[in-house]
Amino acid sequence: MFKVLRIKPTAYVIAAMIVAGVFMIGGVVVVWTQAAPITDKMVTSQYVVQLVPYVKGQVKAIYAQALQPMKKGELLLEIDPAPYEYTVKQVEAQLATSKANVKQAEAALATANAAVPNSQANLDKAKAADELAKTQEQIALNIQRADKAAISQLNVAKATQEREQADAAVQQAVAGVVQAQASAQQAAAAVQVAQSSVPAVEAQLQDARFNLAQCKMLAPGDGYVVNWQVQIGTMLVPAPIAAAGTFVNVSDTAVAAVFPQNWLANVEPGNDVEMVLNPYPGRLFLGKVDYVIAATGGGQFTTSGTIPNAARIGSDGLYAVRINFTDRAVASKLSLGSGGSATIYTNKGKATHVISKVAIRMKKWLLYVMPSVEKPS
């Protein structure tokens, strides 16, 4: 090279060439780590649901098997529904009784309402008879005053007696109207009381039917069950510490990859990602950056009366990045907690992307011969 450049190979020239080479290689490395960061700290992530029953009871039947793929809504197991069926029947009988009481009260109200105009008609009739009796009594008295011989004392007394009887009939008719109106009001109140009990019993019936439906434990999503040790006859209770098993939901499989914080300056949502997973040597998986989790537990302090020890405050200098798989169908078949390697291709320094492309493909093939177990830290 010195002959081509026609430079005399002195010690200073050789030293300068070495320094220049170091700077050139270092510059490439700096641009590479900022443009296409690569990491071996990653894991596949899926949502996990504890299968806790809503009702208690003995397991009557088991339909799911551990690690068997299942669709959302498929039956996992069934709790003995007999006690809850009895409750439903009991509340249904209460509801039927409540509705019958409403009909009975409405019939009584109709009868009471019909009695009001009848009693009013009797009152009108009694008033008319009273007016007639008063008129006849007055005529008899007038005749007696004009000529005592024209009418006997017996007829006058009879007219007075009939008028008194008519007055009494009016008072009795008034009391009948008051009583009929009071009966109608009482019947209306009874209808309201009977009607108010129906919604409460209907709510009890809905709750009883809901509890009965909860005897069937269904898959909360697409996935599979693990830690499935429940057996027929097992007593299940609605307590998180006594879960029937664990359900892994594969419908939203993602990757959490960890990078040094200074390598993520150019990473943006939507950047292309290539990954290799330890359980799948020889395969390359594609994805997109969802977002950078720009938070770490090292900066979280709990409320306490103890002053933090300054020597223990610090950060590992790492951030996690959530990555979504491009092919969701392939992602749903991946194992939970798989390790591997990932590289992100930013929109900067695209000429250096080839370094990460070669490196990630080398890792893909090396998985056939190299163990993927990390040494404990």
Image (cartoon, helix red, strand yellow):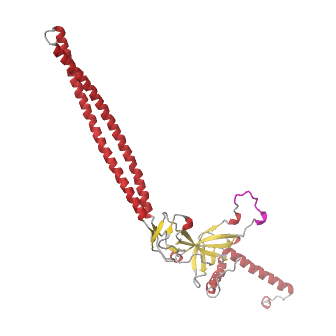
- Inspect the magenta stretch and tell me whether residue 280 lies in it: no
Image quarter of the C terminus: bottom right
Residue 136 lies in quadrant: top left
The boundaries of the magenta stretch are: 302-312
As drawn, the residue found furthest toward the right would be: 11
Q: Is residue 170 visible?
A: yes
Q: Image check: 225 left or right of 90?
A: right
Image quarter of the N terminus: bottom right
- Name the magenta segment's main secondary structure: loop
As drawn, the residue found furthest toward the left would be: 150
Measured as percent of width and height from the top left, residue 58 is found at 47, 68
Q: Nearer the viewer, residue 288 or 153?
A: 153
* Residue displayed at 26% across by 34% down: 117
- Inspect the magenta stretch and tell me whether residue 307 lies in it: yes
Q: Image check: 229 left or right of 308?
A: left
Measured as percent of width and height from the top left, residue 311 is found at 78, 65
Residue 180 lies in quadrant: top left
* Residue displayed at 24% across by 31% down: 121
Mark count:
0
* In this view, 237 is above or below 118: below
As drawn, the residue found furthest toward the bottom would be: 3
Residue 294 lies in quadrant: bottom right
* In this view, 225 is above or below 194: below
* In this view, 45 is above or below 208: below
